[in-house]
Image (spheres, helix red, strand yellow):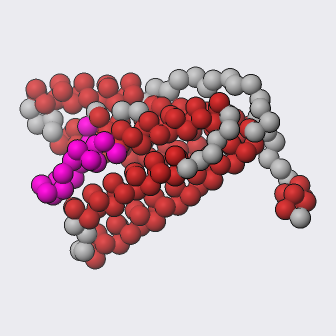
């Protein structure tokens, strides 16, 4: 369970640490220092999540939990593969800013497409889906607005962490939901697959 929680914190940690590092680089004068502190405060406020909501148990809960968990697993694997590809290209000197930008934008669009294709049947499932989709829609908008003709990477900004609290809340909500149902034993899983 701790390993799973750490997985969910990887993305926010990377975003925040990058933001803090860029803020440090920009803090060479006092006016920039003040705006960097304000930006950090806004980032920290965005990371505050709502309390987990209680939903009534429904017959389709396990169906939706399985779909959301499968989405998370498949998307995480796809994102890890993309990051590995970009890292290898970076090491070999073949990576361009345009290519990296386009691959990341495609990854965000894939998240939205995969989410849209989920056939969720419960209110709680659709609630989680909506929170995750809202975050990825914000990211898609940022990648769409950022042109690669300037060959600029998307600069971390307050906008890039917008919705991150909702994304984290969705992960917490899903974990809470899963905890309400005991994991099937290997024997039960084998019986259901027969």
Q: Is residue 147 left or right of residue 160?
A: left
The one of 179 and 53 positioned closer to us in this rendering: 53
Residue 46, how many percent across, how many down?
A: 39, 28
Residue 82, how many percent across, how many down?
A: 41, 64
The one of 128 and 34 positioned closer to us in this rendering: 128
Q: Who's the residue at 33% across and 61% down the image?
A: 103
The number of callouts visible is: 0
Within the image, what quadrant is residue 87 found in? bottom left
| Magenta highlight: main SS | loop
Q: Who's the residue at 53% across and 32% down the image?
A: 169
Residue 76, how many percent across, how many down?
A: 52, 55
Which quadrant, please, contains the C terminus?
bottom right
Which quadrant, please, contains the N terminus?
top right
Residue 142 lies in the magenta-colored region: yes
What segment is highlighted magenta in the picture?
140-157
Residue 13 visible from this viewpoint: no
Within the image, what quadrant is residue 150 found in? bottom left
Residue 97 lies in the magenta-colored region: no
Residue 29 visible from this viewpoint: yes
Q: Is residue 93 left or right of residue 83?
A: left
């Amino acid at each position: 369970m701790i390993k799973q929680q750490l997985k969910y914190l990887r993305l926010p940690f990377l975003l925040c640490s990058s933001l803090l590092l860029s803020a440090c680089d920009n803090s060479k004068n006092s006016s920039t220092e003040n705006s960097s502190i304000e930006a950090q405060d806004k980032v920290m406020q965005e990371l505050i999540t709502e309390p987990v909501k209680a939903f009534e148990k429904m017959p389709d809960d396990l169906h939706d939990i399985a779909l959301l968990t499968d989405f998370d697993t498949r998307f995480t694997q796809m994102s890890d593969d993309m990051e590995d590809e970009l890292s290898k290209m970076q090491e070999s000197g073949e990576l361009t800013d345009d290519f990296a930008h386009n691959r990341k934008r495609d990854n965000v669009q894939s998240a939205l497409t995969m989410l849209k294709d989920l056939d969720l049947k419960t209110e709680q499932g659709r609630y989680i889906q909506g929170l995750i989709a809202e975050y990825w829609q914000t990211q898609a908008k940022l990648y769409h607005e950022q042109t690669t003709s300037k060959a600029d990477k998307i600069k971390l900004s307050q906008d890039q962490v917008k919705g991150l609290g909702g994304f984290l809340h969705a992960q917490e909500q899903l974990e809470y939901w899963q905890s309400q149902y005991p994991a099937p034993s290997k024997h039960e899983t084998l019986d259901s697959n027969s």
